[in-house]
C-alpha cells in the first residue's frame, strides 16, 4: 500500500493563498490528465486533499491472545489492511498465525515477543476516508452534523481553515472548553437546572463555541442536555464542537465514505464496552485518529493545540478605534475523574493560560478541587488534619491505594500554584449565576493583563451590557474620553443598542462625539467590514469613484426616497450640514429618545426604500443618521 505523505502548512489559516494555490494546482493537474477521457473534471474536495488519517501498519499480537488474533492497537486481524506486517511473535506463534491467515498475509518470525505497539512506529498515514454529514435518528426529528476523521497531530492551522473556510463557521467571541469524567453520574436536580440554564445563557448570549469530547457519556451528556436543540435551530449562534477519539466511536463503520451522508442510530453506552455513541446535540465533529480502537488520548492532543491556537485569533468584530480582542477561552469543570487534575494544571499553566470554573457540588474531582481551593494556605498545602481527610476522600472516591492517592494530592497542590486562575461556582452562594461566573472569570485573569478598554471590548463582543455594568465599570472609574468614544463607535458599528445607552449614561457627550469627520469615518468603517451590499449600492447609484462623504450619503438617501425629499445632511447650497439641536428631524424614520425604536410609517413617502435607509439615533437633543450592518 502506498503511504501518502502528509501535507503541512506553515503559513497559518489566515494566509489562504497557500492553501488555495495548492488546491488549484492539484485541480489543474488532475483536470489536464483526465482531459482526454472527459471534457469536464470533478474537483477534489479540499478535505480529501489536505486531511489525513492513520491506520495500523504492523500487527503486534496481544500477549496471551494469539488464538483470537487481537492486535495491540485494539483491532482484530481481519480489520487490518491486507498488506499489514505481522511481527513480534516467536516461531511457535508464527506457525499458529499461519493457520488463521489468508494467502495474502504473511507472519514474520522476528524471534521477539516483547515489542511494544507505538503510534509513531506502527502506523501509516492515509488520506482520510470518512467525512460528510451525519443524520441522528431516534429523536422527535432528525438532526444533522458535519464530521471528519483526521490525524490526531493535524496542525491547528489546517483544522481552523477547515472550520472557518470549508465549514464556514464564524470566529468565536468565546470558547467554553468543558471538562469532566466519563462516568454517568447523576447531578442533583436543582444543580442540574442551574447548570443547564447558566451554560445555555452563557453560550447563547455570546455566540460561543462549546467544545466537548462529543460522546454521549459522562459530563458531555449533561452538556448536551443543557444545549438541547438550540444548536440545531435556524439562525442559532451556538457552535457545539465535539472532538472525539475515532477509535472509540460506536458504529464508526457507518461514517466511512467521502462526502458521505449517513443515518446514525445510537444504541447507548454500556459499562465495559470500549465504544460510545456520538451525542446528537452537536453540529460539528472532529474525530481524532491515532490508529487505535477502544482507547482515549489522541483527541486530547488535537483539542489542546486547537484551543491554544484559537487563543491567538482576533475576535471577528468591526472595530472603529478600539483594541482587537483575542478569542478568550475558559474551562468549565463538572464532576471529573483521576485525569482531571492534570488537565486543569495543563490549562492554567499553558503558554496562553486558560481560567477554569469549577462547579462545586457536582461530585468527585470538582468537589475535591473546590475544597482545596477554599482551605489551601500560601504554600499550596492544607493543615495536617485536613490533608489526611482529603487523601482519604481521594482513596474512597477513586478506589485507589495510599500511594496513588498521595500522587493525586500532589497534583492538587500543583493546581493551587495558579489559584487565581480557578473560580468556584457554588449554588446558592451570592447572587451570581453560572453564566456571570464564567464570563467574569475571563475578565479577572491577571496573566492576560486585560486593560479596562479590553475588558469593555470583550463584554461588547459578548453583547453582555450587564457584565460591563456590574464588573467593568465598577472596578475602574478613570475612563478617558477617547476610550469611551471609541467604545461608542464600536457599539454603533456592531448594533449594540444597550451599550449605546450605557455609554451615554457613563458620560459620553453626544454633541462632542458627533462631527462630520466622525460620521464619515463611521460610514467608511461600516462599508469596509462585512457590508458589501452597502458598498455595491453606493457604487451603483453614486458612482464607483465617488468617495464616501457625509454629503454623498445624504444624496444617496435622497435618491432612494425620491419625491423631492431633501436630506438634512445637504442644505440648499449643497454643503454638508448636521441637524441642529433645535431643528426637527425632517425624516419619518427618526427615533425619539422616549419611544426608543418606532416602526416604519404605514403610509411611506413616494417610492421610499426604508430598508435601505440608515437608522436614526437620538443622543441628547441632536439627531444623527448612522450606518448599521443591514445597510
Image (spheres, rainbow, N blue to C red):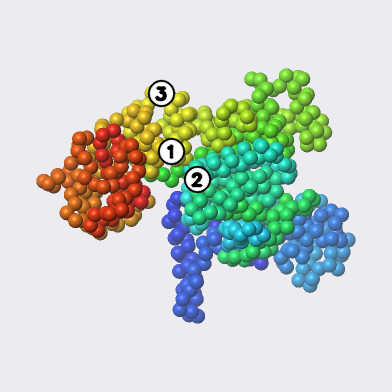
Inspect this view and state whether residue 527 appears. Answer: no
Query: Residue 84 versus residue 548: which sits nearer the camera?
Result: 548
Q: Is disc 1 placed on a helix, strand or loop?
A: helix
Q: Is residue 441 above or below residue 179?
A: above
Q: Quadrant of the N terminus?
A: bottom right
Q: Is residue 11 left or right of residue 114?
A: left
Q: Earlier in the sequence, mark 2 or mark 3?
A: 2
Contact flag, marks 2 and 1 (Cβ < 8 Å): no
Separation of residues labelled 2 and 3 (CA atoms): 29 Å
| Residue assigned mark 1 | 460
What residue would you read off at disc 2? 207
Q: Residue placed at 37% from the left, 32% from the top?
A: 503
> Is 429 on the left or on the right of 489, as rendered?
right
Label 1: how many Cα within 10 Å (few below 14, some 14–19, many 20+): many
Asked whether 405 or 374 is in front, the reply is 374
Residue shown at the point (27%, 54%) measured from the top left: 604
Q: Position of residue 485 (x, y in %)?
A: 33, 33
What residue lies at 45% left-to-right and 43% top-to-bottom? 315
**Residue, x 23% and y 49% (percent of image)?**
553
- Element type at marker 3? loop
Q: Residue furthest right?
A: 92
Label 3 sits on residue:
477
Q: Is residue 472 above or below residue 601?
A: above
- Work out which residue is located at the far front of the displayed protein and give it: 602
* Tag 2 and tag 3, C-beta contact below 8 Å: no
Amino acid at each position: 500500500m502506498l503511504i501518502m505523505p502528509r501535507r503541512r502548512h506553515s503559513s497559518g489559516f489566515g494566509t489562504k493563498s497557500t492553501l488555495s494555490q495548492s488546491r488549484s494546482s492539484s485541480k489543474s493537474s488532475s483536470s489536464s490528465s483526465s482531459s482526454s477521457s472527459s471534457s469536464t473534471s470533478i474537483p477534489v474536495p479540499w478535505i480529501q486533499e489536505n486531511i489525513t488519517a492513520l491506520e495500523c501498519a504492523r500487527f503486534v499480537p496481544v500477549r496471551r491472545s494469539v488464538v483470537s488474533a487481537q492486535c495491540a492497537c485494539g483491532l482484530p486481524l481481519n480489520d487490518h489492511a491486507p498488506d499489514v506486517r505481522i511481527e513480534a511473535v516467536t516461531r511457535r506463534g508464527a506457525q499458529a498465525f499461519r493457520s488463521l491467515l489468508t494467502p495474502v498475509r504473511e507472519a514474520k518470525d522476528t524471534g521477539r515477543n516483547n515489542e511494544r505497539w507505538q503510534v509513531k512506529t506502527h502506523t501509516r498515514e492515509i488520506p482520510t476516508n470518512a467525512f460528510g454529514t451525519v443524520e441522528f435518528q431516534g429523536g422527535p426529528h432528525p438532526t444533522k452534523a458535519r464530521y471528519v476523521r483526521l490525524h490526531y497531530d493535524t496542525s491547528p492551522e489546517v483544522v481552523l481553515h477547515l472550520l472557518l473556510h470549508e465549514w464556514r463557521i464564524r470566529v468565536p467571541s468565546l470558547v467554553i472548553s468543558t471538562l469532566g469524567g466519563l462516568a454517568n453520574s447523576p447531578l442533583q436536580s436543582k444543580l442540574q437546572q442551574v447548570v443547564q440554564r447558566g451554560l445555555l445563557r452563557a453560550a447563547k448570549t455570546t455566540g460561543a463555541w462549546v467544545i466537548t469530547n462529543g460522546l454521549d457519556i459522562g459530563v458531555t451528556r449533561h452538556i448536551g442536555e443543557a444545549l438541547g436543540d438550540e444548536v440545531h435551530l435556524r439562525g442559532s449562534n451556538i457552535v457545539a464542537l465535539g472532538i472525539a477519539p475515532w477509535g472509540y466511536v460506536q458504529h464508526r463503520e457507518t461514517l466511512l465514505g467521502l462526502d458521505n451522508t449517513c443515518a446514525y442510530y445510537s444504541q447507548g453506552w454500556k459499562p465495559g464496552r470500549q465504544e460510545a455513541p456520538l451525542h446528537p446535540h452537536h453540529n460539528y465533529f472532529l474525530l481524532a485518529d491515532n490508529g487505535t480502537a477502544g482507547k482515549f488520548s489522541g483527541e486530547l492532543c488535537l483539542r489542546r493545540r486547537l484551543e491554544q491556537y484559537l487563543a491567538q485569533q482576533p475576535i471577528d468584530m468591526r472595530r472603529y478605534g478600539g483594541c482587537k480582542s483575542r478569542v478568550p477561552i475558559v474551562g468549565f469543570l463538572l464532576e471529573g475523574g483521576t485525569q482531571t487534575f492534570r488537565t486543569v494544571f495543563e490549562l492554567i499553566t499553558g503558554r496562553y493560560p486558560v481560567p477554569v470554573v469549577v462547579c462545586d457540588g457536582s461530585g468527585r474531582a470538582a468537589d475535591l478541587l473546590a475544597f482545596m481551593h477554599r482551605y489551601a494556605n500560601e504554600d499550596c498545602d492544607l493543615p495536617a488534619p485536613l490533608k489526611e481527610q482529603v487523601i482519604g476522600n481521594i482513596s474512597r472516591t477513586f478506589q485507589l491505594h495510599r500511594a496513588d492517592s498521595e500522587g493525586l494530592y500532589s497534583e492538587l497542590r500543583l493546581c493551587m500554584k495558579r489559584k487565581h486562575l480557578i473560580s468556584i461556582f457554588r449554588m446558592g452562594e451570592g447572587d451570581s449565576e453560572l453564566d456571570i461566573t464564567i464570563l467574569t472569570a475571563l475578565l479577572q485573569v491577571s496573566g492576560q493583563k486585560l486593560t479596562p478598554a479590553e475588558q469593555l471590548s470583550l463584554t461588547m463582543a459578548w453583547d453582555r451590557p450587564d457584565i460591563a455594568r456590574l464588573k467593568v465599570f465598577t472596578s475602574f472609574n478613570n475612563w478617558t474620553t477617547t476610550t469611551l468614544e471609541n467604545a461608542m463607535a464600536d457599539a454603533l458599528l456592531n448594533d449594540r443598542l444597550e451599550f449605546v445607552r450605557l455609554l451615554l449614561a457613563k458620560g459620553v457627550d453626544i454633541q462632542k462625539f458627533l462631527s462630520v469627520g466622525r460620521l464619515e469615518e463611521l460610514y467608511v468603517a461600516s462599508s469596509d467590514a462585512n457590508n458589501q451590499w452597502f458598498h455595491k449600492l453606493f457604487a451603483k447609484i453614486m458612482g464607483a469613484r465617488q468617495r464616501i462623504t457625509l454629503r454623498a450619503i445624504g444624496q444617496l438617501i435622497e435618491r432612494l426616497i425620491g419625491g423631492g425629499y431633501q436630506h438634512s445632511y445637504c442644505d440648499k447650497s449643497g454643503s454638508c450640514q448636521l441637524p441642529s439641536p433645535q431643528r426637527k428631524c425632517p425624516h419619518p424614520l427618526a427615533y425619539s429618545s422616549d419611544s426608543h425604536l418606532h416602526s416604519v410609517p404605514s403610509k411611506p413617502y413616494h417610492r421610499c426604500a426604508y430598508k435601505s435607509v440608515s437608522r436614526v439615533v437620538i443622543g441628547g437633543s441632536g439627531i444623527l443618521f448612522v450606518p448599521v450592518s443591514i445597510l
